[in-house]
Image: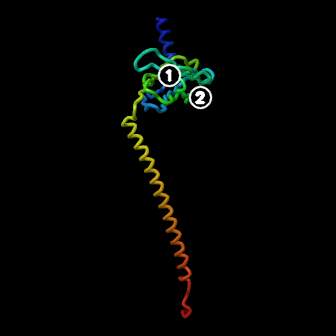
Amino acid sequence: KTSHLSTVFHALIFAYHGMRIYTPGDVEAVNGTDVRLKCTFESSAPINARLVIVSWTFRPLSGGKELSVFHYQEKPYLPPEGIFKKHISWAGDIMGSDASIIIREARFIYNGTYTCQVTNPPDVHGQVGEIKLRVVKTASFNDLLYLVLAIGGGIAAVVFCLIIIVSCRRCKREYRQRQLEDDEEAPRKERKDPTAW
């Protein structure tokens, strides 16, 4: 019983102190474009930039062995060879709890599962983050719809601002014109008929 309770107690400690990793899950990229693989983490221990280790690995969609994509330990280590050579960039910020990377000029061979693992001693246990990347020929309908909405929203905002600016200028012009008219009428009202007593 004592042994069992001890095991449960240690499991609870690991669960409490374990590193938490957050990733978007599924990501889609158009062939030949850059794509950001976002990975953020939460540690119960204070972040120590000298001790934090970030590891990214890749498992092809077709199967096969897992490949090392990126490694960070005090500084980023990019892949010196293989299919990811000159195609990976560090986009994270350790003190900002960000372990993201960017894949440059995504290709179809990059289809698969990417794993993000972060350790920050004493937080060396916990889950890993996974991202399933799908490289496609053209953007999906949803992406195109978001793009159209974003462009349309931007144009609408510009038009709205122009309308406000034009309206303000017109109001100022009318206000100045009224002031001039009032200034011209004031002396007339003050003039008296010389024949009047």
Disc 2: CA contacts within 10 A as few (<14), some (14-19) or many (>=20) = few
Is residue 97 visible in the rendered structure shown here? no
Residue 89, position as x, y percentages in the image: 55, 28
Q: Nearer the viewer, mark 1 or mark 2?
A: 1
**64 shown above or below 160:** above
158 or 51: nearer the viewer: 158
Furthest toward the left, the residue is 141
Furthest toward the bottom, the residue is 195
Residue 45, position as x, y percentages in the image: 57, 22
Name the mark on residue 48. none
**Residue beneath the point at 51% across and 67% down:** 173
Quarter of image, res 197: bottom right
Q: Amino acid at mark 1?
A: Ile
The count of marks equals 2
Disc 1: CA contacts within 10 A as few (<14), some (14-19) or many (>=20) = few
83 or 61: nearer the viewer: 83
**Residue beneath the point at 40% across and 40% down:** 146
User: Which numbered disc flags the more N-terminal residue, 1 or 2?
Assistant: 1
**Residue beneath the point at 42% across and 41% down:** 147
**173 shown above or below 13:** below
Residue 48, position as x, y percentages in the image: 61, 23
9 or 100: nearer the viewer: 100
Name the mark on residue 95. 2
Is residue 107 visible in the rendered structure shown here? yes
Residue 195, position as x, y percentages in the image: 55, 94
Q: Amino acid at mark 2?
A: Met
Residue at image mark 1: 83
For label 2, the SS is helix
Gap in angstroms between the C-alphas marked 1 and 2: 30 Å
